[in-house]
Image (cartoon, grey):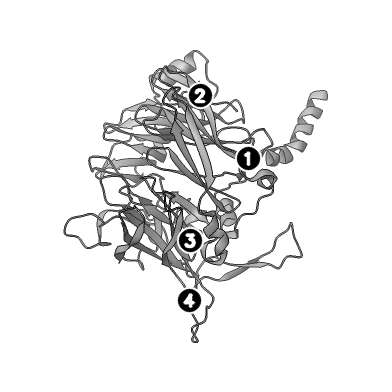
Amino acid sequence: MSETNDVNDAIKHFPRLRARTLRFGCGAPRSAQTVGDGSRALFLRSDGPEDLVTALWLSWFDESGEHHETKLADPRELLGATADSEDVPAEEKARRERAREGGTGIVGYSADDDGNRIVFTINGRLFLTDIDWNDETGAPEPHTRELAGEWLDEDPAMYTPVLNPRIAPDGEHVLYTTGSYLMLVDIGGELGDRITAVYGVSVEDEDGNPAENTWKIGLAEFVAGEEMDRYDGFWWAPDSQHVLFESFDTADEPTWHISDPADPEKPAAGRRYPRALTRNADVYLTVITLAFDENDRYAGITGNADVDWDREAYEYVAAVNWRRGHDPLVLVQNRRQTRDQVLEVAVAADGAALGATRVLEEHANEQWIDLVHGTPAYTPDGRLVCSLNDMATDTNRLTMDGRPFTPAGWNVRTVLAVTDEDVLAVVQRAPEIAPEVPDAWADAAATESVFGDHDARSFDVVSIDYNGTITPVTTDPGQWTASRGERGIVVSGRDMRSARAQMRHILGEQSATIAS
């Protein structure tokens, strides 16, 4: 009877405990991104199992192979007591809701290619962390400051809210959106920080006065965020000289009024959301070329073109991928999500007009086309990796230039990295179609060193070469993801034994568990 009472008591307290711990994720490392060669990795972590305020951390190996963790930025040190009482813009609250983000403090970040400059927001303010490296000790020395704070204070109606800040790959500039304007921040130097509105959308009535603005710029529309897990609305080019951005008009969408259960006296807020058999937002893509002066300060737009595709037939922008050495790829879908096109957008192509597109692949499935995040993508040498809903084998597979190369029964859920030799992916194995498992999994199961099976319940990280050979990265069944550099990789997730999240940073023969 006592055991039954214990179980019932645990069930009774589970919902509140799960809520207080953000699904048992507080205090555990998350949101890892390898930088440089993979010997370093950025991640987020709060201070305890019920602490919601996340800080920015760096996991790194020194030259001797010893592992270290360094706190780069702590919201409580930057803002004091106000870090625990969040005040974020309504648009950011909506983004977090769609991303199922319940934390506070630093909940996202953007790093340059070297990983030595990182931008993020706290309570609607923009911050920059610079990492210097001590020549004698080899240790990181982080310096964090507010970025362009005087500009935000001088004219908040113009320069706020600060939404989705993204640092340029070269680390010299930051883009963010207010929803009405794309803002470019020149970082410091002798001339100080500066914010410039580089592109905007506004609406006026017949008398020239501001009217209801149903346009947004630099944000993902509701359908993209809620149904496609695409939260970005603009993308830096790898050369830091071009930007591709979305704008959309919600005028044809119905308005819903949503009340706040926590504040019943507060008037219901109007939001435009699509409804079945009604119009979606009207989505556009634009590509611009930026100019900078001798001091690397923004000097204007030298190229500007709308991206050309059949927007009536393919109204959803499902994915954008832009890797170094190539023009951007855009995946567009029809309303029923039964047909799609993979487009290449001309930016640096010789002889092609800026914004012109060419169709690289088309796919159709009269039932439904599943989206596989991370696709489409170019390999560094220019081959095209796409997803395929293979109905004949009942498997979500990957193709290389149209040829399937991942084996039947291995459902690809996410593509994490694409190289000339392989793809790193999250997969689910269907045992009835793919009964054989890699030797590493069979050996671990034989020694009973793992718990559970690698079946449809397990999201495993594997490397798949273009001959279809699978090499496991994770051994324990569980819910896993990863971020990989040239030499190092960070694996994070949960196994089947515990609800607690875990993270490991691996560099060659060295491996370290990042503390929870």
Type of amino acid under label 4: Val
Q: Nearer the viewer, residue 336 or 214?
A: 214
C-beta proximity under 8 Å, tags 1 and 4: no
Observer-nearest of 50 and 387: 50
Q: Please tell me which of labels 3 and 4 falls first in the chain.
A: 4
SS for callout 3 = loop
Mark 2 highlights which residue? 68
Q: Secondary structure at mark 4?
A: loop
Residue farthest along the right direction in this orientation: 1
**Based on the displayed image, in which of its 4 quarters is residue 114 positioned?**
top left
Q: Residue at label 3? A: 221
Instruction: Name the amino acid type tagged 2.
Output: His
Classed neighbour count for the residue bearing mark 3: other residues with Cα under 10 Å, few (<14), some (14–19), many (≥20) = many
Q: Earlier in the sequence, mark 1 or mark 3?
A: 1
Distance from disc 1 to disc 4, alpha carbons, whole Å, reads: 41 Å
Q: Earlier in the sequence, mark 1 or mark 4?
A: 1
Real-space CA distance between mark 3 and mark 2, rounded to the nearest whole angstrom: 40 Å
Q: Nearer the viewer, mark 2 or mark 1?
A: 1
Residue 44 visible within the image: yes
Residue linked to disc 4: 203
Classify mark 4: residues with Cα within 10 Å, few (<14), some (14-19) or many (20+). few
Residue at image location 59% in from the left, 39% down from the top:
74
| Near-viewer residue (106 or 197) | 197
Left or right: where does residue 102 sit relative to residue 112? right
3 vs 4, front mark = 4
Question: How far from the left and from the top, in percent, is residue 294?
Answer: 30, 54
Q: Check disc 1 and report the residue beneath it.
A: 77
Three-letter amino acid code at the position of disc 3: Glu
- Point 50% across, 54% down: residue: 148
